[in-house]
Image (cartoon, coloured by chain):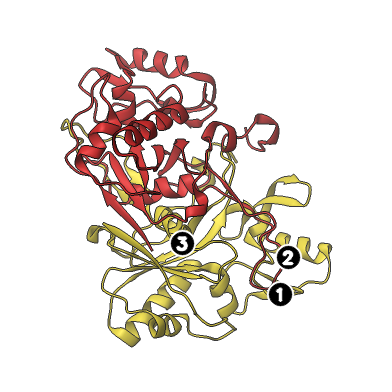
Chain colours: A red, B yellow
């Protein structure tokens, strides 16, 4: 059984704050918990808020965060970010940030996840997985879901190659994006308007814990991409 | 808090079997549980297994289940199915089905979900949500995740339009694909080689329960699709 547990009453985050410390003040983590941290508070703690005064400022920020624009529709641009993520408006938004500011995505969410993991370990000596998550749309399905932008200590992808099915035949679909599934699971206790920015997912299969990276394992290189 | 609970020891399913009955024999459901049923056992119960004797038979089945082929790579075709799903090989695969057979997706997974919901209610008088799930790839990210092919009694999408953020500003991202997130959460206790075909997700926000449909709410019409 897996449990999905919100951590309420975390403080408002500002540049320089230690996210791991704030989490362990509020919640008793145990080994192999996965701590899912919404990228918005990581952006705040890492000083990734930017002042904007106009729509044109916003567009400039989107373009500055992007390698290229894939599609436009009205005010929405689907871009490839410098990280390699394909998403709307380079993941920039204004919700839950002070008036007149926008939050850029963390520069390197795998590194941010490792930092939070290390902060938690330094205080508690408990080994957990950390996922930095955000909310992205999908090409073929309406609605958004939460996905992993960065991971530490937990697999981004598990590889089931060589695994046999119930009839002892080798599985063909072999790579499961479990960090994205955990991020989606965590979203279910968030509610977009609530203050829940950190969720603990407890009971994840212990074989899923290892060093990993979204940048290396999840982002498709253009050569293998059929739709870009 | 949300709990994700696998139901072990369900029987092998064959055409005509009552999935709801088998579930309630093994598990005590409570109101507002969400029962996530892998489409493979729905296909089996609905007689959607087909004999194939060659690679060419398999390709014919994929094409027969598809409106059109969007991309090909080696033996893999990305198609738009008659339901409107964009997925590899029309969702057809051979894992966990008898040698020499393949499983087609259910004809109408919303209807399948409603049938299972009604079977459960008939036996127990307990109102649950039901999701029929399958495993799909994504355009921009490596790895597969589980998504909802059909729903009954639980929202496919929740609409947060008009919701205010922590700073009392209206949210812009407003449609969350919670049925896909619940399907992904359920996958975390499955493991591809295990016999876990049904998972209960308990504790989902009670406001998410209503009549809904993946066909109506999740499938993008080509006119709003930027990448087809």
Q: Nearer the viewer, residue A11 or B168?
A: A11
Q: Residues within 10 Å of mark 3 (few under 14, many from 20)?
A: many
Chain letter belonging to callout 1: B
Q: Residue at x 43, y 31 (%)?
A: A114
Residue B29 in view in this figure: yes
Asked if A172 appears above or below A19 in the picture, the reply is below
Tell me the quarter of the image containing the C terminus of chain B. Answer: top right
Labels 3 and 1: the sequence-earlier one: 1
Q: Residue at x 40, y 28 (%)?
A: A112
Labels 2 and 3: the sequence-earlier one: 2
Q: Position of residue B103 (x, y in %)?
A: 65, 70
Where disc 2 sits, the SS reads helix
Disc nearest the viewer among 3 and 1:
3
| The residue positioned farthest toward the front in the image shown | A125
Where disc 3 sits, the SS reads loop
On residue B189, the disc is 3
Asked if B144 appears above or below B103 in the picture, the reply is above
Q: Position of residue B59 (x, y in %)?
A: 77, 60
- Are discs 2 and 1 less than 8 Å apart at CB? yes
On residue B61, the disc is 2
Where disc 1 sits, the SS reads strand
On residue B50, the disc is 1
**Would you identify the image quadrant in which residue A55 lies?**
top left
Labels 2 and 3 within one chain = yes
Q: Position of residue A40 (x, y in %)?
A: 32, 30
Q: In the shown orientation, is residue B222 left or right of residue B206?
A: right
Residue B177 in view in this figure: no
Labels 2 and 1: the sequence-earlier one: 1
């Amino acid at each position: 059984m897996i449990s999905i547990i919100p951590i309420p009453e975390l403080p408002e985050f500002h540049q320089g704050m230690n996210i791991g410390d704030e989490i362990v003040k509020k919640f008793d983590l145990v080994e192999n918990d996965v701590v899912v941290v919404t990228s918005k508070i990581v952006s705040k703690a890492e000083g990734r808020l930017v002042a904007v005064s106009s729509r044109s400022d916003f567009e400039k920020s989107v373009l500055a965060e992007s390698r290229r624009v894939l599609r436009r529709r009205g005010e929405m641009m689907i871009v490839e970010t410098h990280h390699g993520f394909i998403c709307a408006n380079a993941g920039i938004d204004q919700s839950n940030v002070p008036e007149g500011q926008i939050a850029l995505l963390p520069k390197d969410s795998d590194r941010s996840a490792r930092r939070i993991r290390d902060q938690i370990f330094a205080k508690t000596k408990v080994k957990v997985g950390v996922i930095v998550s955000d909310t992205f749309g999908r090409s073929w399905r309406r609605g958004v879901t939460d996905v992993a932008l960065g991971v530490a200590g937990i697999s981004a992808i598990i590889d089931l190659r060589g695994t046999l099915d119930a009839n002892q035949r080798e599985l063909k679909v072999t790579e499961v994006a479990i960090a994205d599934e955990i991020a989606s699971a965590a979203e279910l206790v968030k509610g977009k308007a609530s203050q829940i920015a950190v969720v603990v997912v407890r009971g994840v299969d212990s074989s899923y814990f290892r060093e990993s990276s979204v940048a290396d394992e999840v982002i498709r290189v253009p050569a293998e991409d059929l739709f870009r």
